[in-house]
Image (tube, rainbow, N blue to C red):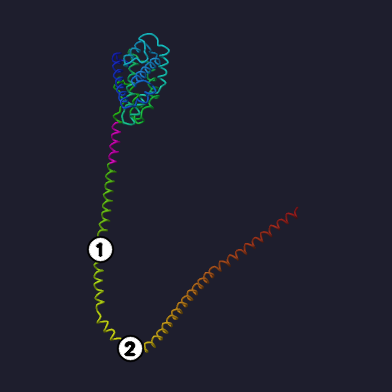
Amino acid sequence: MIQPKFTNKKLLEVAKENYEKLVRFCAVLDGEGYWQEPEKYLHKSIYEILDLYLHSMMMHLAVYCGNNGLVQRRFMMETTDTNPFSLPDEGELSNDTLLQVQRMLRTPPIVLQLCGVRDGKEESFFSSYFFDAVLSILLSFSLLEQKQSKFVDKFITEYYEKNANFINQDQRETVVNARYLFLKLSSERYFDETAPVQNLKYTREEQKRLREQKRKEQEELRKEQEALRKEKQKGRTNTVEEVEPQEQVEPEQTDTVEEVEPQEQVEPEQTDTVEEAEPQEQVEPEQADTVEEVEPQEQVESEQADTAEEVELQEQVESEQADTVEEVAQQEEKVEPQKSYLKQELHEKKKRHKKIKIEKNKKRSIFEYSD
């Protein structure tokens, strides 16, 4: 709770100064086109809605705290540029005026909502500044005549809880939070205790710097990868170009081959000498006969060699079969003791079972006899 020590004139100056801030915010919203859609349904300018909202809040605070006098009414009329509810200087308010005030209080703070929309798009702080200016006007209104009701803090707290959700989340958590509200309600110079947006500004700038740094690093990495890809592609094209000239040199070699072939055809003298030598070969019939006799002997020897190889292969197969038979026999010899052991154990179990059955029959007969 603030200790009231300011004059009504000072309080009015504080209220008018904060009202001018709100008007500037409305001018920006109107100039950027945020008011085009709401104006179609409300049929009022953004400045008229601002004055209606402020007058409704101050009248609600006056009724809530029980300080609804002429001083408060003049304060409202002098703070804003217009008198939206046509309040009289003196006398009671009409029922129609009270209904309009109640209807306005039930309406969400549309100007504050538009500030939040702009903050989300432009990364501005309109919603925090707007909310802080409204609180400063309400606190100035509550301190008139150097007295303050004990219900003011409760009214401001309820107003904060009801409308804080219209402020962007990051501003609600770091700027217009519970600590800010406590300082606003307890500081003697409440109008100097403005929304602390500097910390959030620094955080946003740091995040922006980190994002820009990351973007640059990714861009450099992409350029390096692109350069490496181009270098690899260039290396492949160079190797292809080196291989192609070697393939083109081969026609020269074919030309040399074609040059050599005519030389072979040009030598008719050698063919004549061959034809002269042929009669000499025909003169030797006895040698040809001996050769023909030798050839059947060689065929017989080759057939004998083939049969010897077949015999060796059969012997190898027979030896391998013998080995497998021996292995099977060894395995059977190993398994046979196990079989005999199992048979003996089974026989012993049968004998024990038979003995137990005989003893049970004896006991049963003894019991029957006793009965």
Magenta stretch in the rendered image: 201-215
Marks 1/2: CA–CA distance: 51 Å
Q: Is residue 185 visible?
A: no
Residue 135 quadrant: top left
Give the side of residue 292 with respect to residue 274, left or right: right
In depth, the one of 307 and 199 nearer the eye is 307
Residue 204 quadrant: top left
Q: In the rendered image, which residue does mark 2 sit on?
A: 282
Binning the other alpha carbons within 10 Å of mark 1 as few (below 14), some (14 to 19) or many (20 upward) gives: few
* Label ID, residue 104: none
Q: Residue at x 24, y 69 (%)?
A: 255
Q: Is residue 33 visible?
A: yes
Q: Secondary structure at mark 2?
A: helix
Give the side of residue 245 with respect to residue 331, left or right: left
How many marks can you see? 2
Binning the other alpha carbons within 10 Å of mark 2 as few (below 14), some (14 to 19) or many (20 upward) gives: few
Q: Residue at x 29, y 84 (%)?
A: 275
Q: Main secondary structure of the magenta part?
A: helix
Give the side of residue 194 with respect to residue 105, left or right: left
Whichever of labels 1 and 2 marks the residue nearer the N terminus, that label is 1
273 drawn magenta: no
Q: Residue at x 27, y 41 (%)?
A: 216
Q: Position of residue 30 (x, y in %)?
A: 32, 24
Q: In the rendered image, which residue does mark 1 sit on?
A: 248
Q: Position of residue 349 (x, y in %)?
A: 62, 62
Q: Position of residue 221 (x, y in %)?
A: 28, 46
Q: Amino acid at mark 1?
A: Gln
Residue 37 quadrant: top left
Q: Amino acid at mark 2?
A: Gln
